[in-house]
Image (cartoon, rainbow, N blue to C red):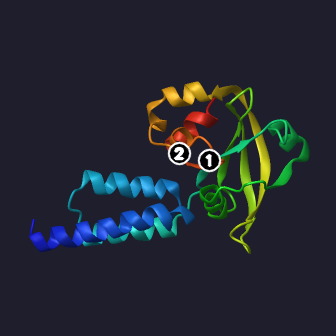
Amino acid sequence: MTPRGHDISCSFGRRFGERASFRCRFFSLRTSALSFLFLSCHPSPSAPALFLLLFLSYTFPMPNAYLLKTEPSEYSFTDLQKDKKTVWDGVHNPVALRNLGEMKPGDHLIVYETGDEKAAVGTACVVSVKVTDPKNPQVEVAAGKALAKGITLAEIKANKIFATSPLVRMGRLSVVPLTPEQYRFLASS
């Protein structure tokens, strides 16, 4: 391994990693996880290998996953199922608004009810996104299936895959990005 090759791959990897958390979310949270795993498994990958990874991430877009928190007394998952579709609003936190604005049609969602229950209760998906005003993105959400058994906040906190999740670390964040592993855990019940 030449120092030049190592510097190039680290520099490119660092830049790619930074963009993976911002730009590749358009394409896939899975792609970000894949690039992280790829770069961590191969400390000095070749430039063609990095190019291939980048090319594949833009060629095969996959949906992202998010968790949406809602207060059941205001709008519950049952209300969403009755309405079938709704525009998700009432979000004021700047980080949550950014997460909402980054959503794309087809993204997977977990609906989490706060209040007395504090549990993930159902699935949904993004139908359309209009971000004419970054402070008020218009995200239309379609109801999915109710989870067979709600997953409580205590169960989520006990699972090590959520150790670094904003869901656990930033309790008041109402729109939380999920990794594919986190989404599978929540949606599989």
- Height in image: 82 above or below 8? above
- Height in image: 174 above or below 129? above
| Residue position marked by numbered label 1 in the rendering | 173
Residue 117: x and y, percent?
A: 72, 27
Name the disc covering residue 166, or none.
2
Q: Quadrant of the N terminus?
A: bottom left
Q: Quadrant of residue 56?
A: bottom left
Q: Quadrant of the C terminus?
A: top right
| Residue 57 left/right relative to 109 | left
- Report helix, strand or loop for mark 2: helix
Residue 82: x and y, percent?
A: 90, 41
Residue 135 in view of the camera: yes
- Residue at (16, 67) in percent of width and height: 6
Marks 2 & 1, CB-CB < 8 Å contact:
yes
Of 173 and 165, the residue lying toward us: 173
| Residue 77 left/right relative to 187 | right
Residue 57: x and y, percent?
A: 46, 65
- Residue at (16, 71) in percent of width and height: 5
Question: Which amino acid, mark 1?
Answer: Leu
Q: CA distance from mark 2 to mark 1?
A: 7 Å
**Mark 2 neighbour class, 10 Å CA radius: few under 14, some 14 to 19, many 20 or more:** some
- Height in image: 134 above or below 113? below
- Report helix, strand or loop for mark 1: loop
**Mark 1 neighbour class, 10 Å CA radius: few under 14, some 14 to 19, many 20 or more:** many
Q: Residue furthest right?
A: 82
| Residue 42 left/right relative to 94 | left
**Which is more N-terminal, label 1 or label 2?**
2
Residue 58: x and y, percent?
A: 49, 69
- Residue at (22, 73) in percent of width and height: 8
Residue 53 in view of the camera: no
